[in-house]
Image (tube, rainbow, N blue to C red):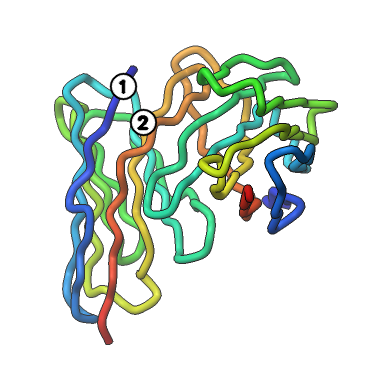
Amino acid sequence: DTEVTQTPKHLVMGMTNKKSLKCEQHMGHRAMYWYKQKAKKPPELMFVYSYEKLSINESVPSRFSPECPNSSLLNLHLHALQPEDSALYLCASSQAPGTGVSYEQYFGPGTRLTVT
Amino acid sequence: GQQVMQIPQYQHVQEGEDFTTYCNSSTTLSNIQWYKQRPGGHPVFLIQLVKSGEVKKQKRLTFQFGEAKKNSSLHITATQTTDVGTYFCACGTSYGKLTFGQGTILTVHP
């Protein structure tokens, strides 16, 4: 199984709402990622989890809160978002990065988020 | 951090024509990965290049990594309508960080 699943596919939320995005993989990968992608732009890395521990936070505002409950699941909790946060949020997984080694990443289909 | 510049931003071709996208860096890259994103889809891994001067082929796709490991290219021979999408190069670090180029949006006219 080389699939990464994400729910929901679409999400519309107001600026005062709290919502969560979910991501799951069953490939035994020990690294998971959150990316944000605006239209006609490349994915921008937000967070990296390695062995269920947050290893990279790309200076993401605190209104985005990641969580990795176990090696298969990754959540992104959203609170008090702004309209400019509207984007496609992509989850990805890979083998855990090692010294001098980089692995291919498997992306989920994404959650298209609209903040009103 | 490492940055990669990718050109062209857009490419329109007639079906059957060839297509090339280029990725350049001012610093030596440890590796380069290539991804394809179909319209409305998500990035899908195509290949990773690690060695200086490496050339890899996948059917009509040819990937090259420069001798100095500062540039890479993806060449598609005889494009088909199924090739439409955005092609991204990305450089990876040992910490898992993947930095993407701006992408080349390929349109193929039948």
Q: Chain of mark 1?
A: B
Q: Which residue is drawn at the image coordinates 42% and 27% (left, top)? A: B92
Query: In x, y percent, where is residue A88?
Result: 56, 49
Q: Residue A32: image x %, image y %?
A: 65, 31
> Which residue is the site of mark 2?
B91
For disc 1, the marked residue is B2
Q: Count of labels shown?
A: 2
Q: Secondary structure at mark 2?
A: strand
Label 2 amino acid?
A: Cys
Give the position of the C terminus of chain B as an image quadrant: bottom left
- The residue lying at 59 percent from left, 25 percent from top is A47
Name the chain under label 2.
B
- Residue B72 visible in the shown view: no
Residue A39: image location, x then y, percent? 43, 53
| Local crowd size for mark 2, using a 10 Å CA cut-off: few (<14), some (14–19), many (≥20) | many
Look at the numbered discs 2 and 1 and tell me whether their residues touch, using CB distance below 8 Å.
Answer: yes
- Residue B21 lies, with reference to residue A49, above or below; the image says below
Q: Nearer the viewer, residue B16 or A14?
A: A14
- Residue at the far right in the pictured view: A69
B48 left or right of B22 in image: right
